[in-house]
Structure formats: structure tokens, C-alpha cells
Amino acid sequence: MSPVSPVSPVSVTDVAPPPVTAVARGPGALRRLVRRPSFVAGAVLLVGWAVVAVFWPHLVPIDPMTQHPAERFRSPGWGHLFGTDQFGRDVLARVLAGARPVLAAAPLATAVGVGAGSLLGLVCGVRRGLLDEIVMRVVDVLAVFPSLVGAVVVVALVGRSTTTLVIVIGVFFLPIVTRSVRAAALVEREKPYVEAARLRGEPFPSLLGREVLPNVAGTVLVEATSRLGDAVFAAAALSFLGLGQPPGSPEWGASVADNRVFLQHAWWTVLFPALAVASLVIGVALVADNLREQVAAR
């Protein structure tokens, strides 16, 4: 009988972490995305509105806040492509100017909600135990609490401002993001590379940041893009209800609210701000859907 060859021990350092998500793999994933017309269309809408938000004063020579009573309710035409409102203000200038407050609040609110939710989801998904139970019960309470009621209470307590809008929307996103990232982290914590990192004595923050986070980055990215579209719609909706930008602001939701009583005989004062909201939300949704498909196909 031939002697049995000894089995060499396997070091924990030999266990390599799995590759990061397809979205984070660089040029290959990007090339696949740009071949998709829906992704390109969404990206064009998103980038286009971002450019408008930054450079709108250079795009139209008209002050969106200046009133011209003699030109009130001018229908769309050569002098005013989108017409004028009840104060004679140019609707095109107001639509372009309204992109800035929306894109100032929505990305910040998304960063707050996705950042805090991702951190909580990672910690709870990897650590588990009593901390996970406590945090998830709080998340469950936030998830069932009516968001509109919460917004009204917060605005009544602290006043109407962009900061309040950002915090309110970010807190609304917290339960959704926490649950999604926690689910992804629960899958990763059972894989060999996490156990290997624990056996090496890797500190918990390093375990989260260096080992688990890169492998749930696709989930975080999809949540960020999805919540951005929700934040745009939420900011416009809260402004429409008088909980965001003050009356008279060119912000899209506030513009729709100010002009809705004139819808029958001055439809353009409502239609164009509403189309602006819809186009930006659709653009973000198209980008998010394509990223979600890339993550699912990794």
C-alpha cells in the first residue's frame, strides 16, 4: 500500500474574498451599460438637468422672479416659449431655475438616507445579536409611520427650510435602505472570506469596510440611484403641499401648487413644471433599472 501523502494545512490568508460586484468592475460593466438605449436616455436626462441646475442663469436672459403684470398669462410662443404665469413671469426661466433647489435637496437627502441606512444594514447584517434586534425594531416602527404626517410634524416643530427637507426625506429612506443592505450583508457574512477575516483577527470596522462593503457595493449603488428618483418626487410633493420651498419659489412642486387654480385657462403654468419633475424622475429610474439588472446578472 502506498503511503498517504500528508495534507498541507490551509492558511486563512489563502481564502480569497469573492470578486466585487459587476457594477464595480470598471470599464467592462460601463461598456455594457452604454450599449443600452434606456440607460443612455436616462443618463442624458439626469446629466442634462444637472447642467441646467448649475448653469441656468447663463441659459436664459430673463429673471424668473421679475414680475411683468402687462404680460400675465401669455400663451407659449416665440417671445415666451413656455408662456408666462399670473404675474407675467417667464415659465421657461422658472422651470430652468427650479432645477437648482430640487437638485440641491434630493442628492443630499439621498446621501443621508443611503449613507445612514447602509451603515446600519452592514453593522446589523454582519454583527447580528441584540444590536440587530433593537435596530430592526426601530426600523420597523419608522417603516409603518405615515411619512406625510411625520413631515408635517417636523416642519411644524423646526420650520420650513432645505435642511429640514433633506433630513425628513433622508429619514423616510432609512428603513428601505437598511433592510436592503442588511439582506445583502447577511448573505456575505456566511461566506468563507468573512470567516477567514475573523480568524485573522481583523477588526470589525475593517471587516465591514474592506471585506463586506465592496461585495455589497452593487446593492448600495442601486439603492442610491433608486432613492434619488424618490427624493426628487418627494421634494416636489412636499413643496406642493407647502412643506418645502416657500410660495413664489421657482421650485417645480411649488410652481405647480401656485398655478393649479389656473389650470383650465393657463395650462402651461402647470404642465411644464410637472413635465420637468416627471422627466427627471424617469431619467433616474431608467439608470437605476439598468444598474439593478447589472447587479442581478453578476
Image (tube, rainbow, N blue to C red):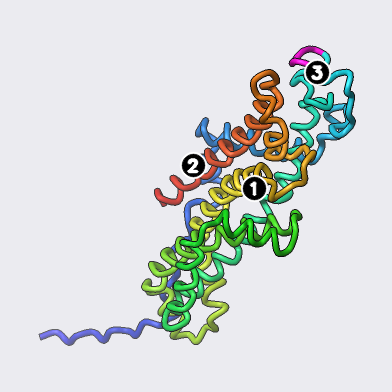
**Residue sitting at x 80%, y 18%:** 80
Q: Which disc is residue 131 wearing?
A: none
Neighbor class of circle 1 (other Cα within 10 Å; few <14, some 14-19, many 20+) is some
Q: Which residues are magenta?
A: 74-78
SS class, disc 3: loop
Give the main secondary structure, helix, strand or loop, of the magenta stretch: loop
Q: Which disc is residue 290 wearing?
A: 2
**Residue 32, image x and y in percent?**
50, 40
Q: Earlier in the sequence, mark 3 or mark 1?
A: 3
Between 252 and 159, the residue placed more toward the observer is 159
Amino acid under disc 3: His
What is the CA distance from the residue labelled 3 to the residue labelled 1?
A: 28 Å
**Residue sitting at x 48%, y 63%:** 181
> Magenta includes 252?
no
**Residue sitting at x 51%, y 52%:** 222
Between 216 and 82, the residue placed more toward the observer is 82
Q: Which disc is residue 238 wearing?
A: 1
**Residue sitting at x 77%, y 13%:** 77
What is the CA distance from the residue labelled 1 to the residue labelled 2?
A: 28 Å
Relative height, residue 79 to residue 153 (above, below): above
Relative height, residue 274 to residue 30 (above, below): above
Residue where numbered disc 3 is placed: 80
What is the CA distance from the residue labelled 2 to the residue labelled 3?
A: 37 Å
* Among the 4 quarters of the image, the one containing residue 116: bottom right
- Left or right, 131 with respect to 4, comes to right
SS class, disc 2: helix
